[in-house]
Amino acid sequence: MEPMFLDDPALFSVWATPDPNSKLAAAKHLAELYKNYLSLAQCYQEVSKAVKLDRRMQVFCTLGWKTALELASAAPPSGFLAGTSVVAEETGDPHINSFCSKHQSYFWRSCGVCDENYISYGSGDLLFRE
Ligand SMILES: [Zn+2]
């Protein structure tokens, strides 16, 4: 595979709403996702806050756009409510940002997919541009 030299391409994350009745399961998922950064207790506090405010949380991050869309259309991780998953650019926040209806993604400044400056597939260290 050729190395990519895109200038700061957009990466994506999936957000979903935690289930008020499954806060511990949601916290466990997030503790696994952020295992080098946040403890289970910290994740539980964040889940409780999100439930109180009825807000989504990042449930998957560092994704290509198509991989994010696939994950958002599948069942959410344990502890999160079905039908609440959305895709946002990694620098975006679906609560405050604009939505590109063509690419089904929230973005901060401009849609990276419209701009042709984005990662298409993969997650973590394995990211691909088609
Ligand atoms: Zn777009």
Image (cartoon, rainbow, N blue to C red):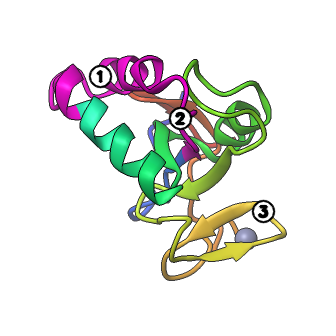
**Residue at mark 2 to residue at mark 1: CA–CA distance:** 17 Å
The residue tagged 3 is 103
Residue 31 left/right relative to 58: left
Q: Which residue is depicted at the point 57% across and 57% down?
A: 88
Please give the range of residues in magenta: 14-42
Give the residue type that dot 3 points to: His
Q: Which residue is depicted at the point 44% across and 27% down?
A: 23
**Residue at mark 1 to residue at mark 3: CA–CA distance:** 29 Å
| Image coords of residue 85 (percent x, y) | 68, 43
Give the residue type that dot 2 points to: Pro
The residue tagged 1 is 31
Q: Disc 2 beta carbon < 8 A from ligand 1?
A: no
Image quarter for ligand 1: bottom right
Residue 23, placed above or below residue 130: above
**Residue at mark 3 to residue at mark 2: CA–CA distance:** 30 Å
Q: Which residue is depicted at the point 81% across and 70% down?
A: 101
Q: Residues within 10 Å of mark 2 (few under 14, many from 20)?
A: some
Q: Residues within 10 Å of mark 1 (few under 14, many from 20)?
A: some
Observer-side mark, 1 or 3, equals 1
| Image coords of residue 84 (percent x, y) | 70, 45
> Looking at the rendered structure, which numbered label has been put on residue 20?
2
Residue 125 in view in this figure: yes
Q: Which residue is depicted at the point 58% across and 44% down?
A: 17
Asked which secondary structure carries label 1, the reply is: helix
Give the residue type that dot 1 points to: Ala
